[in-house]
Structure formats: C-alpha cells, structure tokens
Amino acid sequence: MDQYTLISCIGKSDPIRGLNDGPMLHIVRNYHPKQVIFLLSEEIKTDEQLCEHNRRAIHMLEPECRISEIDTVIQ
C-alpha cells in the first residue's frame, strides 16, 4: 500500500474556495496521504491557530492523517 506525505504551503484558498476544494484539500481527497505538513506564513498561522479549519477539513476526509506544521517567514 502506498503511503503518501503531502507538504503544502497553506493559503487563503485552503481548505475551501467558493464551493470547491482548495488545492490542499483536493490533494488530500484524491491521494489520501498518511501525513500532511503545513508550511505556514505568519498570517495563516494565526488563522489556523484560531479556527483549525484546515486540520478539521483534513480529518473529516482522513481521520487517521497525521498533521504537523512548519512556521515560515513567507509573506
């Protein structure tokens, strides 16, 4: 069985953009990674800490998926 790890820069169109999956969620839905690593800008890190919307969206699709974060200085 394949075991995928997704490394993704999280943006404002994640996890949902309009009524469609954002880029990160689309990949999770189609490839079922066992681990996701978020690369977070300061702005997105603040949003994720408050709402955890990306984590919750992933766990709705893949409850056993491990999620970790890497903080960056990306603007």
Image: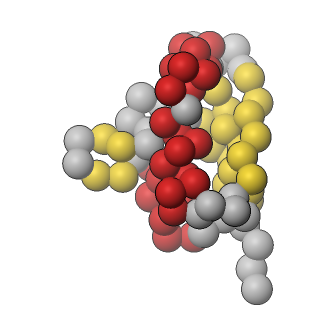
Residue 24 appears in view:
no
Residue, far bottom: 1
Q: Quadrant of the C terminus?
A: top right
**Number of marks in the image?**
0
Quadrant of the image occupied by residue 41: top right
* Residue at 31% over, 41% down: 17
| Colour basis | secondary structure
Residue 20 appears in view:
yes
Picture coordinates of residue 3, whole percent (x, y): 76, 72
* Residue at 23% over, 48% down: 19
Q: Is residue 61 left or right of residue 42?
A: left
* Residue at 58% over, 42% down: 55
Q: Give the vertical position of 23 relative to 11 (above or below).
A: below
Q: Quadrant of the N terminus?
A: bottom right
Picture coordinates of residue 70, whole percent (x, y): 76, 30
Quadrant of the image occupied by residue 6: bottom right
Q: Give the vertical position of 25 relative to 75 (above or below).
A: below
Q: Give the vertical position of 32 relative to 27 (above or below).
A: below
Picture coordinates of residue 48, whole percent (x, y): 56, 26
Picture coordinates of residue 59, whole percent (x, y): 57, 54
Q: Give the vertical position of 63 relative to 11 (above or below).
A: below
Q: Is residue 73 left or right of residue 21?
A: right
Residue, far left: 19
* Residue at 67% over, 38% down: 38
Q: Is residue 54 left or right of residue 39?
A: left
